[in-house]
Amino acid sequence: MSDLTNLTITEALDSLKKKEITSVELTEAHIQAMEQNRHLNAYIVETPELALDQARASDARRSGGDVGVIEGIPMGMKDLYCTAGVQTTAASKILEGFKPEYESTVSKNMLDEGMVMLGKLNLDEFAMGSSNETSGFGGVQNPWKRKGDDTVLVPGGSSGGSSAAVAARIAMGATGTDTGGSIRQPAAFTGICGIKPTYGRCSRWGIVAFASSLDQAGPMARTVEDCAVMLQAMAGYDAKDSTSVNCEVPDYRSLLTGDIRGMKVGIPKEYRIDGISDEISKLWDDGIAWLKDAGAEIVDISLPHTKYALPAYYIIAPAEASSNLARYDGVRYGLRVAPEGGNLIDMYEATRAAGFGDEVKRRIMIGTYVLSAGFYDAYYNKARKLRKLIWQDFDNAYKDVNVILTPTAPSAAFGVGEKSDDQIAMYLNDVFTVTTNLAGLPGMSIPAGLDANGLPLGLQLIGRPFDEGTVMNVAKVMEKAANFTAMPEMAQKKAA
Amino acid sequence: MAELIKGETGAWEVVLGLEIHCQVTSNAKLFSGAATEFGAAPNSQVSFVDAAMPGMLPVINEYCVEQAVRTGLGLNAKINLTSVFERKNYFYADLPQGYQISQQEIPVVGEGEIEIDLADGSTKMIGIERLHLEQDAGKSLHDQHPSKSFVDLNRSGTALMEIVSKPDMRSSEEVVAYVNKIRAIVRYLGTCDGNMDEGSMRADVNVSVRKPGDELGTRCEIKNMNSVRFIQQAIEYEARRQIEIIENGGKVDQETRLFDTSTGETRTMRSKEDAHDYRYFPDPDLLPLVLDQKWVDNINDNLPELPDAKKHRFIGDFGMSHYDASVLVADKPRAEYFEQVVEGRNPKLAVTWVTTELMGALNKADKDISESPVSAKQLGGLVSLIEDDTISGRIAKDVFAEMFETGKDADTIVEKKGLKQVTDTGAIEAIVDEVLKENPDMVEQYKSGKDKLFGFFVGQVMKKSQGKANPAMVNQLLKSKLS
């Protein structure tokens, strides 16, 4: 039998069904892998005992004929999801030690469908970052290395623990959240798949909020089909989230027909930005060719307001964050620093100064500034107007096309510390991904090739609202054409 | 009617506007399912949402929206079919989210107007600017521990309606009448219990002064008033303070002030420079609140009769004075009591017995109409006995006193004490004859022109009949016998 940690979710489900393996065996293999790869710092909290309990219960259910969509599959949970009785920190010191008494809707849905939870995955603090370097619990290492170069690379962010864990085979799949690209960019940096569903498709209830109008939960896994299986378990209407949409969740796997003949794929000219590397450009052309070969029609489109997406995003997201993070004040839970003889304001200041990292503080300040009297119209209101225009761009485009193809990120994974001094360069990581968050659309990244250094690169598919099915079907076609079989060297050694 | 204040430099006009916060009558909070009962143990009615735990989200309580719309309709106001919840951001220990969910740009209820009743019997229309829904904060307790403050989140997230008036009031009397009318309206509607002492109705008062005809002056806001009497005192103090400043060559600073109940003075709470920048923005956790016109119409069709409509009906149907009508309708239970008494009876008698006798007795006993020992049905019984001449008005007062004392029916008391009025001509004639026979001298004097003695004869007859003789019949018989 092949290494259990190298199975895809669908392969493992198949083996479990055929009684070739048990969930306990699968879980034990992953717990062992998790222990062997602690240097990656992918998990903030490991929950091996809980996982084994869940695996045993899953095996019992299976023998009783009660089988969920992801029955018995060991996965990691981004530490932004509140998990009952298990520390939830959002990778912030301000929440260290916080154990929620409630389970987020999405993780509850997954547990109900048979998930085994291995632990809580590292991320950028409060999901603010593109490299996982802002975590209050240390950065995460990308399991990939440049050819012949031992530089430690970032796994992308904010779902960097998730992307690293899935790529390093220490989770079969992982949840992510995506506010400006936080599922897709780390997926691209680690050679895995990840989909940000339509805003409203997955409940936000119980997920620590970063920017409420942009945040969306989604799956990260090694194949398109695995993402489809996971999304099936995660999605659904939730009356506890007023922005959740009551719209039927289709059987995603059945939509992966591989037949995209006659489908129209839009190529937005505005995404050919200055400074885009030849490698990325070429990869994009490859993607276009694969889809053409599969019978799709390629349509040149224009999304004229694309260049305003990044600035609009970096106004709206911090504005919402500055308000969402006001609750971390040391009064009710989490960190409290109360200076001797100080008053309430002193306690707020000391607690928040000690509990939040620099990037979080920076965004709270930006957000507070853009919402302030006298600046509100110039920044926040203007950004809202731009957001509407960006949405209209897509709405117009979707009159002609079914799906849009773009690169996921402007570069491959970079080295730790290489961009952390240059905020603008860091924020530019999101240039291809933020538009879909602003428009609320589904977007998926799949690994499409390697750069000259042997690092994975991703392509992005953007779909119509609630049409994740088409996005994943087209992604499946590209996955087949790209035939991406590369693995991080460390994972190869293990597999051998 | 504008009531001007005399200053050193002439007459001043006071301009007043109110923001009244009404706690919405509802079993659950505005955005969480937690209960809202008054007086529960601290922090026993707090959900994860109210405590702003990470990842918690608000979900609008439809019933609270219905209550706000009902109130808006009761204020004759425009209902906005689309309104938006926004976040008002500020830090305080009893504000767990670090923001209050409120409505800023587009409130659920727009402009309206109500009629207020003044002591001289006149009325005045007061404009309503808006009504919006918002969450209440929790409560900080600073007197429980020498060095710590405690926080009780029971009230956190409770639904409030903030009713904002236009600056249409010109005297503390008008403000009091306005507060009373708003309270009457929400109580009639059942949308707020109007209890100021429990904090379910609180008012912020905006005060400015100007010379009649001038532009509006700079206003000060007096926060968190929870008694009509204090509101009146605060306005009077604040208006004088502002006049004095201006007359001494100074300038009124726009600021938020507090009323000190022990000194009867207002003092600075927050100057304009220290005013919060609340950074309002649409709450991304909530979609715009969209109402269906049919749903609103249905609420409108099922509104109860409101105080002003009832007042005008009382005046029209029962010919009562504006003053009596406004007193009766000011309190819903009182109006209902009256309507039960007047049903099928003489309106004039019913008005007198409710407004003068009953309310006089209740006032003396310091009781509310809901605690009246005499029920509306019982008082109606007494009025009926007067109306059908079973007892005289004079006897009725004694009967009422006993009813108030014992809670017994008028019938029972009249029966048991034999207080029935004598209307048998023969019996009265016998007494009249007896009296005339016993007082021949007086009869002589009367006949020789001393008309005043007539009253003496009436008194004697009434005395002999123990007050039960029908006064009209006594008069008539005496007149004919003495002529």
Image: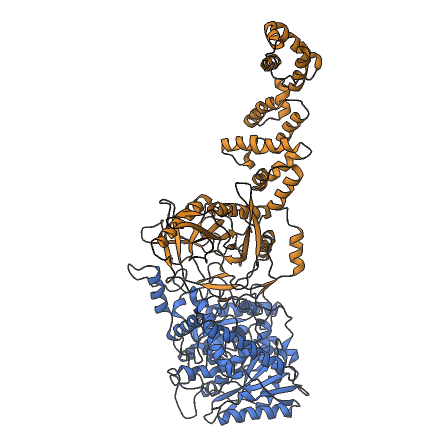
The answer to whether residue B95 is above or below residue A383 is above
The answer to whether residue A23 is above or below residue B477 is below
Chain B on-screen colour: orange
- Could you tell me which quadrant the C terminus of chain B lies in? top right
Name the residue nearer the viewer: A455 or A275. A275
Q: Would you identify the image quadrant in which residue B271 lies?
A: bottom left
The answer to whether residue A199 is above or below residue B421 is below
Compared across the picture, whether B334 is left or right of B211 comes to right
Is residue B152 visible in the rendered image? The answer is no
Q: Would you identify the image quadrant in which residue B357 lies?
A: top right
Q: Position of residue A193 (x, y in %)?
A: 54, 82
Q: Position of residue B320 (x, y in %)?
A: 62, 37
Name the residue nearer the viewer: B356 or A143. B356
Q: Position of residue A363 (x, y in %)?
A: 42, 74
Residue furthest toward the left?
A340
Is residue A364 visible in the rendered image? The answer is yes
Colour convention: by chain
Chain A on-screen colour: blue
Q: Position of residue B448 (x, y in %)?
A: 61, 9
Compared across the picture, whether A103 is left or right of A349 comes to right
Name the residue nearer the viewer: A116 or A230. A230
Residue furthest toward the front?
B449
Q: Tally the numbered discs.
A: 0
Residue at position x 61%, y 5% in the image: B440
